[in-house]
Image (cartoon, helix red, strand yellow):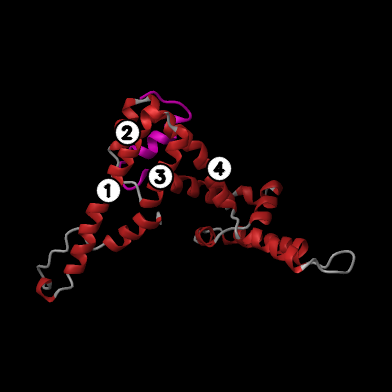
Amino acid sequence: MRESILTIPINEIFEPKCGCPICRMRDMLEERTVDYIMGAAMMEPDVRMETNRQGFCKTHFEQMRACKNRLSLALMLQSHLQSMQKNIFERSKTGFFESKTAKQKKVSAVNNDCFVCSKIEWGMSRLMVTVFELYQKEREFRTLFSEQEQLCLPHYDMMVALAAEKLDKRWLGDFVNACGELTKKYLDVLEADVSHFCKMYDYRNTGKDADWGNSKDSIERAIKFLTTR
């Protein structure tokens, strides 16, 4: 398969054939963005303006908190909190507070935004263009796509919805079928593993020789399949 600046990341994401490739894509962008924001970018004024305005969701706060550089996170939180004090809750120069509705809208904007999520969405939109271009142009990539272990349920939904916009009609049916096969194939495996896990709690299946097969992590795998997390 021919390589370029655009195709190399996609090929690297799809080559492992383990789990959902779109989850791997999201995870790669997420890891890079968190590393970026917890590094030198923390002190860049333009980045700090963005993080002050957008804030972060719980998932990405937790990921940043797990990083070693807690001072960077504290400095960003300090700046973010001070920005909210000044721009949302500070008394106006006229001596009056903003209307409750105006203040609530500003708070709602912060509550429903996230710097990391927005960067991931931006990156995903561009990488997905390349995925669909490769699917149309490269037979090798179509084969690579069909050989994936699975598509999780949310990313199956996303891919099929995007395909209607991004793919030529010539390839649409094949792509939708390929997505369905990947999701159904893993769903069958997952259901069997979860069912086996449940059966192992029957007293007839207990004992030192009990065979759990691949079921011990089936709960975690089922949750990830259903939620991407």
Q: Tell me: residue 218, above or below residue 170.
A: below
Determine which of the numbered discs, if any, sits on residue 22 in the image.
3
Q: Is residue 9 magenta?
A: yes
Q: Which badge, 2 or 1, comes first in the chain's sequence?
A: 2
- At a point 12% along the width and 73% down the height, the residue shown is 206
Q: CA distance from mark 4 to mark 1?
A: 29 Å
Which element type, helix, strand or loop, lies under badge 1?
helix
Q: Is residue 25 above or below residue 175?
A: below
Between 117 and 227, the residue placed more toward the observer is 227
Local packing at callout 4 (Cα closer than 10 Å; few below 14, some 14-19, many 20+) is few
**Of the image marks 4 and 2, the number of the one nearer the N terminus:** 4
Q: Determine the secondary structure under disc 4.
A: helix
Q: Position of residue 78 (x, y in %)?
A: 68, 63
Residue at 49 percent across and 49 percent down: it is 30
Q: Secondary structure at mark 3?
A: helix
- Is 192 magenta? The answer is no
**In the displayed structure, would residue 87 be above or below residue 157?**
below
Q: Amino acid at mark 1?
A: Lys
Start and end of the magenta stretch? 1-23
Q: Amino acid at mark 2?
A: Asp
Q: Which label is found at residue 122?
A: 4
Identity, as a three-letter code, of the amino acid under mark 3: Ile
Q: Earlier in the sequence, mark 2 or mark 3?
A: 3
Apparent side of residue 75 relative to residue 58 in the rendered image (left or right): right
**Real-space Cα distance between discs 4 and 2?**
27 Å
Spatial CA distance of label 2 from label 1 is 15 Å
Question: Hey, which quadrant is residue 175 in on the image?
Answer: top left
Q: Which residue is mark 1?
A: 184
The local crowd at label 3, few if under 14, some if 14 to 19, many if 20 or more residues have their Cα within 10 Å, is many
Q: CA distance from mark 4 to mark 3?
A: 14 Å
Evaluate whether residue 23 shows in this view. Answer: no
